[in-house]
Image (cartoon, rainbow, N blue to C red):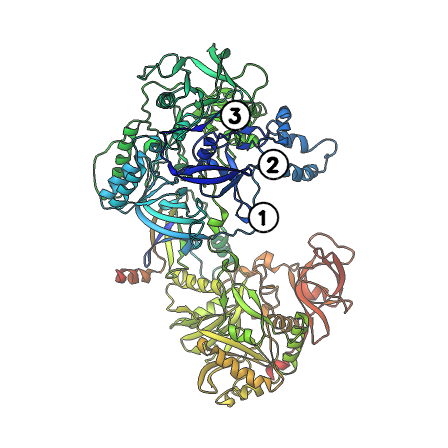
Amino acid sequence: MSSQRIDNFGKINRDKELRFKWENKNYFGYDGDSLASAMLANNIKIVGRSFKYHRPRGIMSCGVEESGGLVTIGVGDKKDPNVRVTSQELFEGLVASGQNAFPNVNFDLGSVNNYLSRFFAAGFYYKTFMGIPPFEWGRGTSIWMFFEKFIRNAAGMGKNSRLPDPDVYEHANDFCDILIVGSGPAGIAAAKEAVDKKLDVILVEQDNLIGGDQLSDNDFDTDTAFKELQNLGVRVMKRTTAFGLYDNCVLGLIERVTDYNTSIDKELPRQRFWIVRAKHIIVGSGAFERHIAFNNNDVPGSMTVNASKHYLNRYGVLTGKEIVIATNNDSVYLTAEILANAGAKVTVLDKREKIDLKFNRNNFEVRNGVVPYKINGSREIKSLDIADSVNSKYKKIDTIQCDQVLMSGGWSPAVHLLSHRGVRPEWDSENLCFLPGEAKENITMVGSARGIWGKEDCIKSGTAGALDALNRLGISKTNYFFPKEGGWKNAIEPLYEVKFNKSRSKSFVDFQHDVTCDDVRLAHREGFISVEHLKRYTTLGMANDQGKMGNIIGLSLMADLLEKEIPEVGTTTFRPPFTPVAIGALAGRSVGKHFMPLRTTPMHQWNLDHGATMIEAGLYQRPWYFPKTNETISEAYIREATTVRKSVGICDVTSLGKIAIQGPDSTEFINRIYTNPFAKLPINKTRYGIMLRDDGLVLDDGTCWRLSDTEYFMTTSTAQAGRVMSWLEELLQVRWTDLKVNVTSVSEQWAVAAISGPKTREVLNQCLEDPSVISNENLPFMGFTSSELIGGIPCRIARISFSGELGYEIYILADYANKMMDILWNAAKKFNGCLYGLEALGALRVEKGHVTGAELDGRTTIDDVGLGKMASNKKSYIGSAMRKRGVLSSEDREKLVGFFPANKKDTFDAGTIICEKNNIKGYGIGRVTSVTHSPELGHWIGLGFIKGGMERWQNTTVVGSDLVRNKEMEIRVVSPHMVDPDGKRMYA
Amino acid sequence: MIRIKCPYCGERDHSEFSYGGDASIEYPSLEAPQEDWVKAIFFRENIRGVQKETWHHLNGCRMWLEVERSTITHEIKSVKPCHPDYTKIVENKQ
């Protein structure tokens, strides 16, 4: 092949040169070039190497179906592998390099595979490396596992950059009446018709110019067409791919905002991921020209016919000098004429014996009843053997000198988007292609995506498509009709494979994955006859072009072998994305610290100012510990926990869920959702309660306060706050619609500080306007009161203890949070108090045997965690019947216990598996869920579960097996209430 | 993406909602025997066609909705508030 730029052709701007680099050499192209056209203009023949055999590959198309020209664009962290040169716009300074080749695409050592190809047929690796007898008898797939990493290393096309993506991506949302995919003749006609009816219309085009196939027409001006659409009010989105079609006419689009030009504002994102919700979708996505399978059909210089026309008329590049066109249909003759006019010597091989068409026969030669048989040459085309068919066997008759072979084996409508909706395409045996099936949703196919070939008919179908949309949307009622599918004067004749009559051949069906006709036959011989099996066994259509060109050849071969028709063999389903989508675009701005929302408490800054180290708890940032100078986390939490037990500590517990429950039936409601009795809870009293799920397992625990006859205030755990709120709403709106109760989440309205330790009351005395409200008489354990902090700040004080010490929780309007912390901290300092975080809070509650999410993990019952006494036998509540199910009341259930290391110097970790002595295996008989160093006891302690619980195991020694840290130790089973089991301190 | 017409908020993406479950279940009374509850909680029809299900408009008005949806096509036949009194609220709004 010798391709070159020629004068007087193309629509590129020859006044503006653009420099680019390919394989470290400098080249230039023009403004308006694609990378492919610029490479062809520079006569770059080999642009890639094939996946398996490392055969040289050239540019084979001019669109997204490209399976030869895959390169890596950019360097360093901007590296982007597997870019199709055909859909990459050229820009100043573009750097492209070859891939899947060593040392480079022109000279690739991997091409030795080509000579070993008889061993590399479909299924080679599996057959060779899986279950090699006798090595793998009884060993499962371990040998495969060993070889797999080497095989994987040798496979693959481009290599990704391992650096963080430096680019920014955006998400955007939009709505419209009608969204049209594709700006070919049909798409533009549909847009004009729809916008004329005052509808909001978006037209999406993946190319940088609108026009579709018309871009290769001399009389089409893309700028004029674009301006006309804009003036009419059509919202045109160029460089935007509709990659997926979803329920309810929702489309996923990728807009390449700065991909094509690095010099654009750095403030703009690289790509934008759009979700567009349309009322109706018109798909005019065009059709792909198929190639023909024959021996060596992949040598650089082979291309589809229509691509060559685009390179000439759009980019001013003549792709060959001596061109052979092989076809079975009418679509190539205009191209033949144009190429001949541009100076090429053109020979058309038409499989059909006789055709009736008007064209200038002097311009180029036509040989009827002839097919391409074998390309001679390996790095470029030297000549083409041609054959005729006798008794359906092909026989070589001649050799033609040429530097390019263009192929057209028919056209396949791009039915991908409709296929995303689960609509199966239907085989049209007249036009030899799959046509889109009937869509039940508001989707209309137009143009050649509908199987309509002629431009005039495409325009008519576009208008009809818009009228169809208007009718179905109930906007107008107009009669319309779609032109008939097809449109060629002479019928197309089947031509999928020209079978080589000698034993070995390389007739490619799928260029990118090196799937040959012989591979398809091998799959058939070995029983992989379903299209889905054929696809997976040979990897046909699984490359990143997803078989846009070759799939139908594979299907026809299989149909032949099975002696069936193509529709009986069926087709695989196309799934999104239509073309590859960058993961970065789907992630959008949700990266780094924006990956999840961040929740902070109102005293977040106050905590930081007072030296807190933070930890994530769900979405919340909570104080973890407050280290003094040079203190480690262990030193800090042990000091904090010790201080709480000895004097006083303050902790931010705002992240608790808070729900206001109001209405005349509130008491009844509360009584139904908690396991313990609430009906007689007096006003100004609070109660610790457990909620079960319908299935009888524990949902959450928390406190519930009675504010008045008809008003309650509920707290939930941090983790379950959202779930409990939805649950209460469900019960009230779905199940108990007769109850007059309203629930409101007030989690963000209240800030909460827990203050605990023996000196707590003395500290609070200095913080309250009226200290008498918190005396032991006025505010006994589990009481609460409304009061005022000094300065008249209203607050609620509840006498609740999670730490096991004398403790109160102060609830205050969120805006007063910092003031409250100042007041409490100023007073606590005088008693050598401390601020404490989640780590110390954990230590204190483990010592007391109080459970949290680690124990209430959705698998435990109220009896498992030792709170069975809180389950009322006198009332019914959610889960009351189900919690007594057989499996939940088995004596063998794992129940809550405490753990001490037998050797007090040992430490252990959560996740340790508990086993019987001398029987260390499997899942064991229990597990450790929470651990801490206990400052009070002076050694490590843990909470966890063991089969049979305390009754069976108290004071016996078991073994803790920590498989992660490869550790085993003896552990003694003790009561979970390890410190102050009678609760004397809380009631003090 | 399924689009659900919330009677209060209008048509929204399904990502605003959270799926509840089978809306045709008649939950037994709290006093009912265990067998009734086992049936109500663990036994579900695997419907091929239109089924009634609940959706919670979690990131919207927080209304629980009864939705009739085809499990084959995702087509939504009807949406109404689960709570009968909310129907009035919705009507008053319009």
Q: Amino acid at mark 1?
A: Arg
Q: Where's residue A88, x and y in %?
A: 45, 39
> Which comes before the other along the chain, label 3 or label 2?
2
Chain letter, disc 2 residue = A
**For mark 1, what is the residue?**
A162
Where residue A416 sits, quadrant-wise, is top left
Q: Nearer the viewer, mark 3 or mark 2?
A: 3
> Which comes before the other along the chain, label 2 or label 1?
2
Chain letter, disc 3 residue = A
- State how far apart marks 1 and 3 are (Cα): 32 Å
- State how far apart marks 3 and 2 are (Cα): 20 Å
Q: Where's residue A115, x and y in %?
A: 63, 24
Residue sitting nearer the eye, B87 or A609: A609
Q: Amino acid at mark 3?
A: Asp
Q: Is residue A488 above or below residue A50?
A: above
Q: Is residue A89 visible?
A: no
Q: Amino acid at mark 2?
A: Ala
- The C terminus of chain A appears in which quarter of the rendering? bottom right
- State how far apart marks 2 and 1 are (Cα): 17 Å
Q: Is residue A690 above or below residue B74?
A: below
Q: Is residue A268 above or below residue A795?
A: above
Kindly identify which numbered label has been placed on residue A155. 2
Tell whether A919 sits left or right of A164. right
> Which comes before the other along the chain, label 1 or label 3?
1
Tag 2 secondary structure: loop
Q: CB of mark 3 within 8 Å of CB of mark 2?
A: no
Tag 3 secondary structure: loop
Q: Where's residue A823, x and y in %?
A: 52, 84
**For mark 3, what is the residue?**
A298
Residue at 41% x, 68% y is A743
Where residue A49 sits, quadrant-wise, is top right
